[in-house]
Amino acid sequence: MTNVQSSRKTGQYGARELSLLCHQIASYLKSGMSPLEAIPLVIEDVKDKEMKAVLSTVSDQILQGIPLSQAFIQTRKFPEYMLRMMEIGESTGMLDSVMKKLSVYYETEADIRKNIRSAVTYPLVLALMMIGVIALLILKVIPMFGEILQSLGGQLPYEAQMLFTLARSMENAVLWALGILVACVLLFFIVIRIKSVRRLFDGLKVNNPIFGLLYKKITASRIAQGLSLTLQSGMDLTRSFQSVLRLTRNTYVHERLATAYEAVSQGRQFSDAAKESGLFPEMFVRMVRTGERSGQLDHMMQKLSDIYARETEQSLSGSAEPLSP
């Protein structure tokens, strides 16, 4: 088995660590072991002391009869999506499949984050270098040459005098700008805790022309994955929808999904409710409608989850061409 090592000493673990952990648990469960037998074996493969302690606590909780998902929840070390999917896996009797899918999901997420860092780091470093060079010229080099020229009895051209005056004034302006920027960042993190402001901010994540479509694809992939698992386990659509409502922490998305759930529970078609929610791309709605008509909604949900997971990865790696169903 591949060793699971944590790069963090506090807080939640990274996507790569979660992928390896889920892979190990899935492998043991797939072989027919119970969580009670599997977790101690996973602990033996873990080298990181902090994660070993966390999993030991999980093992102790399982010994007391607590379900695996609840034992993980009590550690407060793992992401909400993973925990909710584990709950669905336990309730449907498909925990081994869920853990395997979570392993693939977090492996993909790790690759996506790597692509984001690669796409952002170079231009960001280049921009910072350019700003640094310009600031050095304006704040240090030009004033120094101006003072040398004046000390030798020379006279600066009008344009140079204006630039020299600007450099003098910018020395204080830069400090003020940095102070204002820090204050704005702190104010943002304070204000975002207000419920109404948080909902507005969560809504902007979905309804913006730059990243809105990408966010919808990520949401569609997560919801489709949850619905696929629950529907394949034999749940009806209403219970399945209720199970996946907590897969997102976005308050705006949760409200829209709750409204769609109410519509489905009253007998409306899921495709109509999904379209009215405004959360899903058009292709999602069309394929759901096809799944409803063919009676293969569970398989269509799995297909949609795979499609949007790959489209998300392609979008972040620079390819804008959509994948065909």
Image (tube, helix red, strand yellow):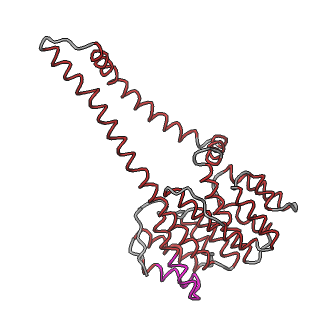
Magenta residue check for 26: yes
Q: Is residue 249 left or right of residue 12?
A: right
The image quarter in which residue 50 lies: bottom left
The quadrant in which residue 117 appears is bottom left
The quarter in which the C terminus is drawn is bottom right
Question: In this view, which residue lies farthest toward the bottom?
Answer: 32
Say above or below: 27 vs 122.
below
Residue 285 lies, with reference to residue 130, above or below; the image says below
For the residue pair 148 and 195, the one nearer the viewer reads as 148
Q: Residue at x 65, y 42 (%)?
A: 200
Q: Which residues are magenta?
A: 23-42
Q: Main secondary structure of the magenta part?
A: helix
Q: Position of residue 240 (x, y in %)?
A: 75, 68
Disc tally is: 0
Residue at point 76%, 55% (across, down): 275
Residue 26, above or below 324: below
> Residue 123 lies in magenta, yes or no?
no
Q: Residue at x 79, y 64 (%)?
A: 289
Q: Position of residue 323 (x, y in %)?
A: 61, 63
Residue 320, by quadrant, is: bottom right
Residue 155 screen position, x and y as percent: 19, 11
Quadrant for the N terminus, please.
bottom left
Residue 49 against residue 33 in the figure, above or below: above
